[in-house]
Image (cartoon, rainbow, N blue to C red):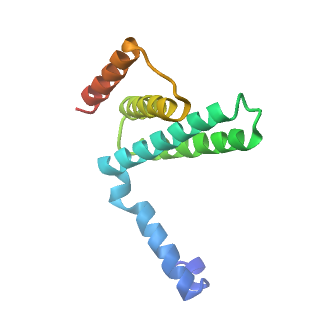
Amino acid sequence: MSQSLKTTPKTQRHKVDWLTQWLRADWLYSKEAALFFILLAALLDIVANLLLKKSNSFTHKGYALACVVMVWIAFSALALALHALPLSVAYATWGAVGIIGTTLGGYILFKENLGILGYIGIAMVVCAVILLNW
């Protein structure tokens, strides 16, 4: 047992051991974890994009700050996904999910519409992600 754990109270030691085991777990380096982190990063990216729209070109400081924080956390989650997936697959998947989610969010929250070419483009993005992850 390390010196730092000897001096740590028993209740805190259990928390430290659990966190250490989780961070070293094989799951963290699995493809399932990578996909989880990509989806988390994409969700945070979608929220950041919608907050960016609400910030009105960073004139509303609360929305702007929340946007920046969401982007930072999203990139952190994407970095965790890179333990198990190549950058090309991880980034393309994250970007595609972000595009689709942001498009849906813009339609639902801001009443933004796509033309027929926009819908064809979304379908092509979905096909590209499926092929990349095949």
Residue 116: horizontal and vertical position, in percent? 37, 13
The one of 118 and 93 positioned closer to us in this rendering: 118
Left or right: 29, with 44 as reference point: left
| Residue, far front | 111
Q: Quadrant of residue 72?
A: top right
The one of 36 and 111 positioned closer to us in this rendering: 111
- On screen, 108 above or below 3? above
Q: Residue at x 39, y 35 (%)?
A: 90
Left or right: 56, with 85 as reference point: right
Q: Residue at x 52, y 28 (%)?
A: 111
Left or right: 32, with 38 as reference point: left
- On screen, 106 above or below 19? above
- On screen, 26 above or below 61? below
Q: Residue at x 31, y 28 (%)?
A: 129
The one of 72 and 53 positioned closer to us in this rendering: 53
Residue 7: horizontal and vertical position, in percent? 61, 84
Count of marks placed on residues: 0
